Image (spheres, rainbow, N blue to C red):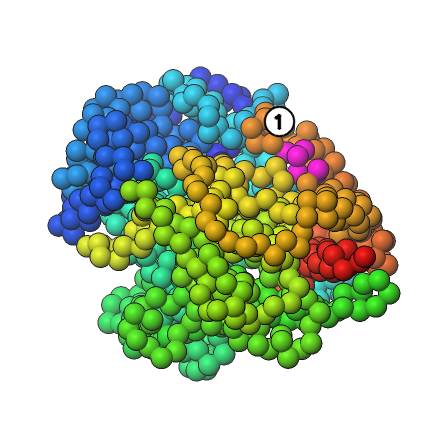
Amino acid sequence: MSKTQYLLSGVATVAAGAIFAQSYISAAMASDKVGFEPNTEQKVTTRQVALLLDRMHYLEQPLDREMGAKILAMYFDQLDPSRTLFLQSDVDEFTKKYANTFAARLKRGDLSAGIEIFERYRTRSNEYYGFAKTLLASDVSLNTQDTIVLDREEAPRFANKDEQMAYWRKQTTFALIGITLGQEDDKAKDKAFLDNPELSRGQDLVRGDERTPKEILLNRLTRQEQQLARLKNDEIMETILNTAMMTYDPHSNYFAPVQANEMQIQTNLQLEGIGVSIRPDRKNPDYTRIVTLVDGGPAQKTGQIRANDLILGVAQDGEPMVDVVGFSVREIVSLIRGARGTSVTVRVKQPNTPDSAARNVTIVRDVIEQEDTGVHHRVVEVPYRGGIKRVGVLEIPSFYLNFQARRSGASEYRAVSLDTEKALNALNHENIDGLIVDLRNNPGGSLDEVAKMLGLFIKEGPLVQIRDNQGNVQVYADKDEGKQLYAGDMAVLINLGSASASEIFAAAVQDYGRGLVVGSTTTGKGSAQVQRDDLALGSATLTQRKFYRINGGSTQNKGVVPDVELVNIYEGIEFGEREYKNPLEWDTIKATSFTPEGKYTKGLIETLASQSKTRQSTNPQFRYLSELNAIRQLDDDKQPADVDIDKRRAKADLVEQKMLMAENTRRQATGEKPYTDWTTYQASIDALAEERSLMKENERPKLPEEEAFVIEAATLMFDAKANNTTP
């Protein structure tokens, strides 16, 4: 269940009774708002997306009546994933009305069906907000005999308003219980910071929130209600068209102009803005706080913008100031960003000052390179068999490429292969004994870039096979006559967050036996998309090919299984291709001809895995992570949860005790002083997190539980070499 949906849920027992329910029903019978009339560009974009699906998708599945009905069903679930808003009668009404014509409407650029359904969703959402606010105005009991299942993704929809409101009542109460318990924790942490100032690491971390839990929840509901009201027509169109594309497969997507801009930024590692990082204010999330300023960026150059400033308003050049208190970070970002050379005015003030002390600062937007988010390299010293090994670590956050700069013929542009080449040259001068390529949580990126990357490590030969929807297979190969920028020992670190291009890289290294692949099974995204920037509005990614390992196996759904398994930090979390709706199937094609190095026999892998398992069972960091996995299993949104504050507090206490015990066991094993209680532990964690958030990403000290994976991967790499060279 999405976080947004969770926050929209939660209302308590039937204490108010039938009288309250009846008065609510009569007040909530407002008709749906009349939807917007799509303009010419929106109609053209709809026809363009429909054409892509009908004729160009990998599945070769026509956008016919049957697919239209599937898209419609998917649309209900996209809008209301936990099935708490639409009644079954809503779904039946629109299915009868539009299922047979939904596809045909999209083909002719007609969004009216999707818009009408969206407005019913808006109506139901506003009914929930009204219901919850009315309930919160009454005396809500936090002690009930009720239970609630929060994850209703597969549950039947409510048959009538009585059923729905009964759930909303429990849902809102559950949310109120959560806020009440959270506030108790916050007040305990405030006291800890005041009693022990050293815990704060010199930062102002006392929340001092005097609002009641009801006030906090009402404020949250109002903020969400206003955000729903501010949704632009392009964003509603995006919801409809993106649903159509995702019904074909999870990685075919449509992005409205604002989101298309975000996609471009992530791919290029470049943006046009003012050079600040922002996030919701810790003390009052209605406000957005400036966390850091980019050195030499437009905001810093003004000398008038400071870290910790709260953003009150944003004005485009020559336009009125927009009050952004209560806006989401995404909304504020979309207002601040714009074309290079244009101006934007931001209204800011320092915390704990009156609004009258706010100042307007006009800033000229410029291109800002996101240097911190590219390839990083470092050298770590790893104890090994009585000595010290120098290990190079290459951290690859994504397989990024500035497509626009390359297409325009720019002499210099950001590309992961170029940055990796520089990093490897630096590491080669460091006299390293081995290399760890860290692909954990790498979401993928450019196919061309991963092929170039592999060429830096592989002598020569095929790297990956790409099959199109006609059955044609293209082989990407390294044809540099055996050149290797790095030819030494290596290991590749992967986890469930490693996807797409990361999986191509890890699979090729594994198939060639070029290095050990260590960690946990990857996402399983074995499809390739083309980006379509030629739409009337926004952009789209369309799945047109699948990639296969050089041994013929697909990574689709199955992922890359590591040679040696380490603790899976995502254990029990619904995440990855196997959890998506409508994923492409796993299959195989003919293997291509290649010559593996043959360094890792089955027997050697089994020995390494056994030895690693023993080490992990005694390593304080891996034991800690394993215990966290076990604790996480205590909460399952698919199982009934008590809507009773005493039972929830007891459950929370149990979880806290187990987490504190796990943390203190780790600290004792590593020679650190245990925490005296849960509050002190959480206060310390908050202070550390705040301190790290103010640092540049590549300057943050590595967390010991994360570094344990690097050390274990290095140990396995050296063990493999030792076993291969021992007579």
119, above or below 229, in the image? above
Identity of the residue drawn at 68% across and 29% down: 647
Indicate whether residue 634 is drawn in magenta: yes
387, above or below 19, in the image? below
Residue 95 spot, x, y in % from top left: 26, 24
Left or right, 232 with respect to 453, comes to: left
Residue 226 spot, x, y in % from top left: 36, 47
516 and 520: which is toward the camera: 516
Residue type at mark 1?
Asp
69 and 525: which is toward the camera: 525
Quarter of the image where one finds residue 477: bottom left
Left or right, 177 with respect to 342, comes to: right
Indicate whether residue 47 is drawn in magenta: no
Left or right, 260 with respect to 189, comes to: left
Residue 681 spot, x, y in % from top left: 75, 52
Identity of the residue drawn at 30% across and 75% down: 409
Please indicate, yes or no, whether residue 140 appears anywhere in the rendered image.
Answer: no
Identity of the residue drawn at 31% across and 24% down: 91
337, above or below 614, in the image? below
Left or right, 677 with respect to 98, comes to: right
User: How packed is label 1: few (under 14 Cα within 10 Å), some, or many (20 or more)?
Assistant: some
- Figure label count: 1
Which residue position is annotated with label 1? 642
Identity of the residue drawn at 55% across and 72% down: 485
34 and 442: which is toward the camera: 442
98, above or below 487, in the image? above
387 and 129: which is toward the camera: 387
Quarter of the image where one finds residue 318: bottom left
Identify the magenta region.
Answer: 630-635
Quadrant location, the C terminus: bottom right
